Image (cartoon, grey):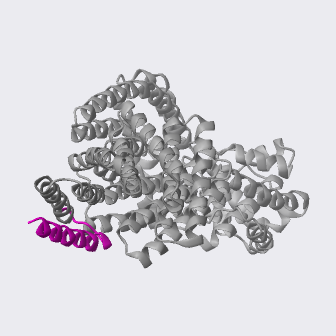
Amino acid sequence: MFFRQKDNLVNAIRLLVAMGGFVAAPGPKSGLSVYDAIRKIAAHPPKSIVTMADKLTEAAQNTLDRTPDAPKDADILFVQMVDAGLLTPHEITENSMDAEVCTEAMIAKLSDKTDPTGEMRRPEMRRLFIKITRSTLAPLFRTKEYAADLTPAYMAESLQTAHRTERKIDDVAAKLDNLEAQSRGTLDALALRFGELAPEEMTLANLQSFLIEKASDYRALQQELETLRGSAPRIENVLSAVEASIRVLDLEEAERLLASVREASSGALRQPLEDNARLMEAQARIALIRQRPERAFTLLSSAADSFAVLDPLEPSRRRLSYARAFYEYGERFGGPVTEIAERIAHAILTVVDASNPRLFAEAQNLLGLSLLSQGRYATDANGSDLLNRAIEAFMITSNTAEGHLRAASLDHISMTRMTQAHRAKPPVRQDLLRAAISGSSEAIALFGDDRPSVARALNNLGNAHLLLADELDGTELTETLDHAFAALDRATRLFGDLGDVMNMAGARFGVATVIERQAKIYDDPVRRKRAIDEFNKALQFYLDRKMPQDAAMASGALGSALLTHATNAPPEHIISLLTAAEAALGDAAAHYRNTEQPLLEVALLRKLSISKEMRALSLPTLEAADLLHQSQAHLKRALELGAAGCEVDELHAANERIEKKLAGLA
């Protein structure tokens, strides 16, 4: 294959030129040996091929430069597509030497086997391949003098190599046992069958050494085939044909026969493996229900590894879906389960690299999500490190040529920026939130017609505007809230149209949060009442569906809204509103405490402290002092948990204020 990226387009065009040359030239018209000869000519081309290919490469480069949707690695993918789609002279003549039809025939050779990641079959690569290949083949097929232009002597030598490769060789074993007695022509023919494309360029000593090693491998292969006798019924049916092919050193045919048997055997093997995996997946689900995530991890790892017999990458594909399951479980229920998703993503990335771009990008993306989930709930220093690592993972994926994965990464970077903003001080916080808004906006444009992804990105965009609004005032504040409402309202409607009730509830929750902020700005009790009603509905929705993490979020928002409402309510309603706020805030804080999510607990503890401090104003001295001590205890725990950024200053200020009130009561 071709390794230097700058030469990818050159190599691809040379392959096409060499392929076209075989049509008019005398020689074999089909067979695997033709492909080897084509590759040999392209790798060591005569001057005439270089001249012609250079002209066609220049035109191809212009086409590539004028294709705005071409992936970043288009040149790499293009040469791989040409190599996988090479046509024999017989196939070209069958297609009437029509450049358009031959181009489609080359594309038809792309399959899960030749293109396991699907990167070559993406619409944008298909369009680019058709443009370049059709315009390259057309002049080649139209030029009658083309075969002569390929330097007859070179072509004849190359075709003779193909002839020698196809020539039947009798008594292979005997010849290999007595190499010294063989003619140079026989030695060359043997070497060609063993895959050496240019044996004539080797010295006699090197050629004999090469064949001695290959003879050893040949005998080992014969012994290995003999051991298969009686061990596998499916192999028994074709084993005689395989051995016959090997006796005449037709290794291509032998490999083809064994590959066909293996494919049939793999198909028969897959179903038992699938059945076993489903059983282990059910066991893992039970383990998660019993709060035993490590047991679930062990079961699913074993299930994934069992598929290695079918395809070396299949365990990684399985792990990807299992990592998503752990991540989603952690998002629903909280706790350390997302750490397991991170471990699985790392396991995938130890065996998968950028040569499998889609699987690599998806694993990086999932790694980023699991780090983001952990960083969102971790204490300051460790949390900041986790979030930075999440950004690094998403940045790798954001460079992928696949538009959808790139868009998802940009949106996930925005989510991470929002989380980082919670920890940052005001100037940096605004920068992070504006970057989040920009990233989600770009993601929405890239997602195009993918409505579910657009809806999720709109939800993130609305939440970024909502957070930014906390840093603003005046006209900029109201305009930012309007932007937040527009994005979240559109997301709500999109999720509704898609029947995605869960995400619709989340977006609707965001709309309620915007309304609650607007109520505060405009001192509008109607808006405030509507927001509280929406938070109550959201809380009940998540409780009914046993989604404690989301229920805690809704309970915290409800408590915050009730607390704000109490500050502007008539005196006779203040105590009942504060009591209800404390109940909601307390439930949410308890969940975050039980699931070890300290940063989220910190925010609620501060509000609990404020509510109890306010309620103490209306109580007799002893009861007021008790409430103020409770308020102080909340502040103390918040500081112990690792409050971050400006929250620390606010907590110390609140504690000093309560100390003064307690001193006054004393």
Q: Which percent across, then down, holds residue 8?
A: 64, 67
- Residue 173 is one of the magenta-drawn residues: no
Q: Is residue 561 visible?
A: yes
- Is 298 situated left or right of 306 in this image? left
Identify the image quadrant of the C terminus: bottom left
- Is 536 situated left or right of 154 in this image? left
Q: Which percent across, then down, holds residue 596?
A: 22, 51
Q: Quadrant of residue 438?
A: bottom right
Q: Which percent across, then down, holds residue 486?
A: 62, 54
Decide: is 381 above or below 218.
below
Q: Nearer the viewer, residue 572 or 565?
A: 572
Tell me how many marks there are: 0
- Residue 659 is one of the magenta-drawn residues: yes
Main SS of the magenta part reads: helix
- The residue drawn where x is 56% and y is 38% is 253
Decide: is 31 above or below 236.
below
- The residue drawn where x is 82% and y is 41% is 94
- The residue drawn where x is 23% and y is 46% is 590
Direction bottom: furthest residue: 427
Q: Which percent across, then down, holds residue 112?
A: 57, 42
Q: Is residue 197 visible?
A: no
Q: Nearer the viewer, residue 56 or 645?
A: 645
Q: Quadrant of residue 95?
A: top right
- Is 176 situated left or right of 653 in this image? right
Q: Nearer the viewer, residue 142 or 34?
A: 142
Identify the image quadrant of the N terminus: bottom right
Q: Nearer the viewer, residue 179 or 111?
A: 111
- Is 572 situated left or right of 107 in this image? left
Q: Which residues are magenta?
A: 641-666
